Amino acid sequence: IRSVKFVLGDVKESITGPFDIVTANLYSELLAAMMPQFAKCLAPDGRLILSGVLRRQEAGLARSLRRQGLGIQETRRRGKWIALVCARQSCSES
């Protein structure tokens, strides 16, 4: 690990990257709306970790990720909730 920087703020206004890891625990509609900003501040080989997502909202969030060139690498499930580990898709994954 080179360095760790914790930032609390609005990704639209105060946070710039690139970051190796970006995490967000928000409701899925807000996650989808913020996806362009997440993609913009994510390093090329970075990971986006999303939580606070209901299982029934996974497909919609996956569509939002794909529109930004991101894909789901891993899904963790607990009860009705999921967390997603996402990364940029390579050409072979498209």
Image: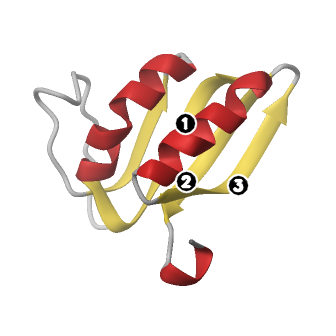
Question: Which residue is under mark 3?
Answer: 74
Q: Relative to 59, does residue 72 appear above or below in the rendering?
A: below
Tell which of 34 and 64 is nearer to you: 64
- Please give the label number shown on residue 76: none
- What amino acid is at disc 3? Glu
Question: Which residue is under mark 2?
Answer: 86
93 on left or right of 76: left
Confirm or deny contact between disc 2 and disc 1 (CB under 8 A). Answer: yes
> Residue 82, percent across and down?
73, 31
User: Within 10 angstroms of label 2, few (less than 14), some, or many (20 or more) residues?
Assistant: many
- What amino acid is at disc 2? Cys
Which residue is drawn at the image coordinates 61% and 43% (left, top)?
62
- What amino acid is at disc 1? Leu
Question: Which residue is under mark 1?
Answer: 50
Is residue 48 shown to the viewer in this render? no
User: Within 10 angstroms of label 1, few (less than 14), some, or many (20 or more) residues?
Assistant: many
Secondary element at tag 2: strand
Is residue 59 shown to the viewer in this render? yes
Residue farthest right in this picture: 79
* Measured Cα–Cα span from mark 2 to mark 1: 8 Å
Quarter of the figure that contains the C terminus = bottom right
